Amino acid sequence: MNLYKTYLELWKSGTVCAGFSPRLPDYAIRYWLEQLEHALPLQSKGAFLDIGAGDGRLSLLLLRRFSVRGTAIEVQVNRKAWQPILDRYGHFELHEGLLQNVMDQLAGKQIFDFILLSEVFEHIPPNDVEPFLQRLRALLSPQGKIFLTTPNSVAQGPAEKSHMWHERQPYGHHKHYTYAELQKILRDAGFSVVGHSFECHGLKRKLYNTFFYPVSRVDARFLNTKKLPTLVRWTYRLCSAPAIWVMRFYFKGLARLVYETEKRCSNELNAATMMIVVQKK
């Protein structure tokens, strides 16, 4: 089973869809997960590191599909979301705290065959980028790979014009990069870029994301809210089932169009996210 199918199974079980409805899987993540799967080393008995791991959905995928040995770092940990993962996987560690502090603690003690850096790089102040990349080098095995995703400034614009600008949001964005800028930074730090792609095409942002995420959140809220009596919630679940089936069919069909568009048409001019695979020179 590939990452995408595993992800859908986990979503439907409610394991990786915190805040969203398990009745409406996110089918449009297929292209993103394919790029992640292509970046994974083909053979590894080593461990992975998930930096900025959020609620653990990608760590769980890697534990299921890559290695049962892993480590995750998150600034503020949601213990309720992480506890099932920690209970099930004995060779997995979760560290809470500032990235640079935890990475310094790991240096010299562990190396990793795969490092996941999903939507983290934009949060690092430019002056801290070079020492951060040197910490990454120290943690990566000689043949290991890093999968890095970050906003594409050509399509998204500069960080200071984003609603996620760090002066507007705690732990917000400090800088958005072009592919050329990021490629130079990585090469200057001793990494070789071995693959890149672009994800979140304008079609996905406008036709899929605009509708899917609000609908999924609303359904989850009605299913789980404690403000409504249990009988009301179950009545809603039963009465809304036909409408949910129709929406699932609609979003699944739209996701196929999104997938083909991203696979064939995504580039730096129209896609919001850069996806870069690097290894040591």
Image (tube, rainbow, N blue to C red):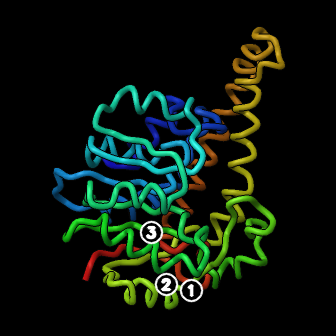
Say which residue appears at 47% left-offset and 51% top-offset: 73
Front position in the image: 82 or 238: 82
Say which residue label 2 marks: 182
Q: Quadrant of the C terminus?
A: bottom left
Considering only vertical position in the picture, is 115 above or below 213? below
89 displayed left or right of 16: left
Is label 2 or label 1 in front?
2
Is 160 situated left or right of 276 in this image? Answer: right
Q: So how many labels did they put on this image? A: 3
Disc number placed over residue 226 in the picture, else none: none
Say which residue appears at 65% left-offset and 68% top-offset: 203
Q: Earlier in the sequence, mark 3 or mark 1?
A: 3
* Marks 3 and 2, the one that precedes in the sequence: 3
Residue under pointer 1: 178
Count residues near mark 2 (Cα–Cα under 10 Å), then give few for <14, some for 14-19, many for 20+: some
Residue 208 coordinates in the image, percent (x, y): 66, 57
In the image, is residue 132 above or below residue 130?
above
The residue at the point 72 percent across, 14 percent down is 234
Marks 2 and 1 sit apart, C-alpha to C-alpha, by: 6 Å
In percent of width and height, residue 242 lies at 68, 28
Residue at x 51%, y 45% (from the top left corner)? 96
